[in-house]
Each structure stands twice: as C-alpha cells, then as structure tokens.
Image (spheres, rainbow, N blue to C red):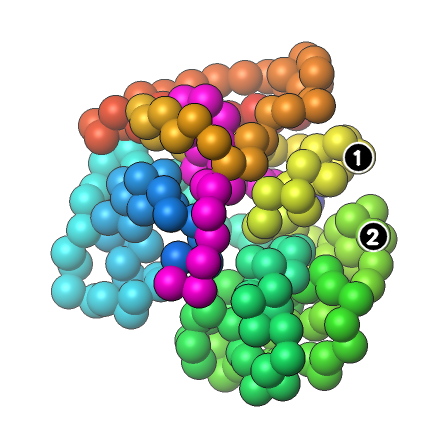
Amino acid sequence: MAVRVDLNISLDGVAMPADPSPENPMGADWDRLVSDYVATRTFRQRVFDDTSGAGTTGVDDRYAADYFEGIGAEVMGAAMFGLHSFPDDPDWRGWWGEDPPFRVPVLVLTHRKRPPLAFDNGTRFEFVSAGIEDAVARAQDLAGGADVRVGGGLSTVRSALAADLVDRLHVAVRPVVLGRGGRLWDDLPGLDTRFTVTSEVAESGVVHVTFAR
C-alpha cells in the first residue's frame, strides 16, 4: 500500500493557475497545464466515457492509465470537489456528474457537514473535517490494501508532502511558463532528497518526473 500523488505543473512549478472564476473554476490557464493529459485515450475513456478509441497513446497515455490503476481510496480538498464554488447548494454532487471517474471511496476535507454521496459506479464521497494525517489513515483503512491517492487540490497535496505522507509523487511538467498561480515546490526544501527521482520525456514534450521511496 502506497500513498500517491499525480499532478500537472508548468516549468515554473505552477500547479494551480491564477484567476479562477465561475467560468474557469480551475484558473484561466488550466487548459495549458492539462491539454496533453486530457488528449490521452485513457482520459477520454475514463472521464468522458468515450469508447471510440480516440485519443493519444504513448508515454502520456501510459501515465494516464497508471493514474487510475491500483487505487483503493482517495483524499481531496473541498475546492477539488467544488464546495468553494457551490457552498450553499445542498444538491451539488461534484464536477463529474453521475459517473465520477474515481470508482472508490473519496474523503473530501471540509468543515461543512454534508451527508455522504454514493454513485452506482462505486464512487462514494464522504465529507470529513479531519486533518491530512487522519484523512490519509482513514483512506488507508478504506482502501482494502490498495494504494491511496491524494488527488488535490494544491494545498491538500502540499500538506501531505509537508507531513511526509507521500510514497510516490508523479508530476507531468508541461513546457509552458505561467508566471503566476499556486506553486507546488514553495516551502518544501530538500523534498527531492527523500526520494529516488526518475524522469521520462513524452512525445508531446511533457516531462514525467517521478519521486519514489
């Protein structure tokens, strides 16, 4: 059982683009970070339910497939679920509609009390006010021996890294410079010394860097 993180970042380390809005809740430059990931066959099938076989293959698609493999539970922040954008909507069920791509228990970190949400595909959102250490421990209990993913957002991932809870961090570094936004690496000095670091360049130019115990 491992605790895993997968993120898309820019050359200057931005993982959360600036200027989120109702029209662009992930920030104005989000597409610039994730376009190669979204273009993969795996993403199109798992998130868009596109079974046509369309989408890119190769290195990016292999990492996209790895993202979904072997996960038994997930931890995410309130913003990733959408509670910051829809704080007063009791019927809000997340960004993903009625077929969320997780298919495992998901712990959403929030101080807002909400009943759990269960979906037919095995996804079950549970809303908890625990700290990151307790949330990861709870996710490990739910994962049934499989891995736990800390999915985001950025502050949740940084908290897990700062607490040294992460066994494998994969970042897909897209060759763009955003210049502003939330940066992954700030205030995490010496992070690389905890891990063995490897890298691989995809056909798209994305550099996949993996930090593993």
The quarter of the displayed image where residue 190 is located? top right
Identify the residue shown where x is 63% and y is 48%. Answer: 150
**Disc 1, SS:** loop
**Residue under pointer 2:** 131
How many residues crowd around disc 1 within 10 Å: few (fewer than 14), some, or many (20 or more)? few
Point out the stretch of residues depicted in magenta: 3-23
Residue 18 lies in the magenta-colored region: yes
Q: Is residue 170 above or below residue 131?
A: above
In this view, the residue in front, 163 or 122, is 163
Identify the residue shown where x is 72% and y is 40%. Answer: 160
- The residues bearing labels 2 and 1 have C-alpha atoms spaced at a distance of 11 Å
Q: Is residue 177 above or below residue 49?
A: above
Q: Is residue 10 above or below residue 82?
A: above
Q: Is residue 55 above or below residue 33?
A: below
Identify the residue shown where x is 55% and y is 67%. Answer: 85
**Residue under pointer 1:** 163
- Where is residue 18 drawn, in percent x and y? 47, 42
- For the C terminus, give its image quadrant: top right
